[in-house]
Amino acid sequence: MEIDVNDRKKRDFVSLSEIPGIDKILQPSPEGKGKINEAKVRRLYLQASTQQWFAPQRIDFSAPVLMDDTSVEVWRKFMLIFYSLEKMGLDTIAHMTSKAVRKFESNDAAYYLAAQAFDEARHVFAIENYLKRLGSPPKYDRGLHIFSQLAAMGAYRVENWLFSTLFSENFASAFLRMARESNLDDQGKEMCRSLLLDESRHLHFLHTVLPDVMDRLSLLGKTYVRTSQFFIMKITEGLARKFDNDATVVGMNRKHLVEDAFENVKLAYDNLNLPKKFLKFPKIAS
Ligand SMILES: [Fe+2]
Ligand SMILES: [Fe+2]
């Protein structure tokens, strides 16, 4: 039977309140040690489970490409970068999950992070197929590998990974929001809309666990994480500058994109009640 990508009804998610006995189901795993807010993380796992989407049902990867040649060229470039970053995110979550679960001593964190890894796999898969549709088979850009090295290597790996993810998820979300307002075609916009739903849940997870992570981090750990964050943001800001003209072609603005990402990281820090001086932001070129 052919899948009807336009059947909106198939996109409706089950709400947790509709599930019989949900109060009991929401009770955290009794094995948890309370190092993170397990009730909230468990709820997020359940939400993630009900919000799974099937990329070929959402996005018609066989639809003809009607964008002009110059725009297609730019979108190939942007989606290749996005593909590489998402693939890096998938690889990183795959090797950091066991370390984070051990640190948190939480079954609920294991459930949740497994669901997030599946989200990231779906993102890589969706962008891969979108790129094929644009006539550009995906290829991982090794030049971007520095981000993965900065985010999940060295000391304080779990903490560093989580704080790096706070930035990368905010940057991805800013990009997706801007792409939805650009000249991207309907299939691309649908992909961005669907990815955003997942990325906002990923940010929710970070907002849930980071206050506890920060509480337990030593002064040396805080300094280490802060320095690593600064370099990740500085490198991102520098790289983004190379795409000023491309962004303009497709109706995006590089400076606004970086500002939006930094602003949301700042807001996250405010909401987390983290010390304001914790994060230093690099200057954004005009
Ligand atoms: Fe993602
Ligand atoms: Fe994500």
Image: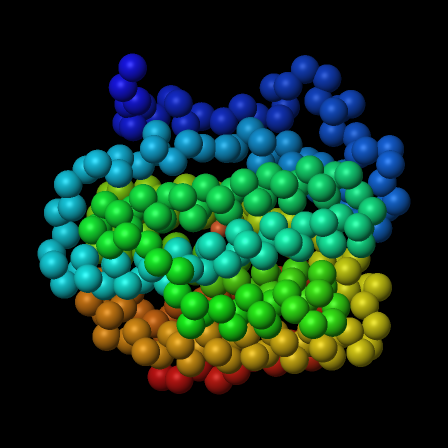
Q: Residue shown at 45%/26% (left/top)?
A: 12
Instruction: Between residue 153 and residue 30, name the one nearer to us.
Output: 153
* Colouring of the image: rainbow
Q: In the rendered view, would you say 24 is above or below 37?
A: above
Q: How many marks?
A: 0
In the image, residue 214 lies at what x, y percent? 77, 64
Horizontal arrangement in the rendering, residue 35 relative to residue 46 (left or right): right
User: Eyeballing the image, is 266 above or below 76?
Assistant: below
For the point 79% across and 57% down, the residue is 212
In this image, 175 relative to 280: left or right?
left
Q: Position of residue 19 (x, y in %)?
A: 64, 19
Q: Which image quarter is the N terminus in? A: top left
Residue 121 or residue 275, whichever sits in front:
121
Q: Position of residue 271 (x, y in %)?
A: 66, 60
Between 133 and 71, the one lying in front of the other is 133
For the point 47% across and 54% down, the residue is: 87
Which quadrant of the rendered structure holds the C terminus? bottom left
Q: Can residue 259 be seen from the camera position used here?
A: no
Q: Position of residue 149 (x, y in %)?
A: 58, 70
Residue 32 shows up from this direction = yes
Residue at x-position 19% and y-position 37%: 63
70 in relation to 276, above or below: above
Residue 27 found in image quarter? top right
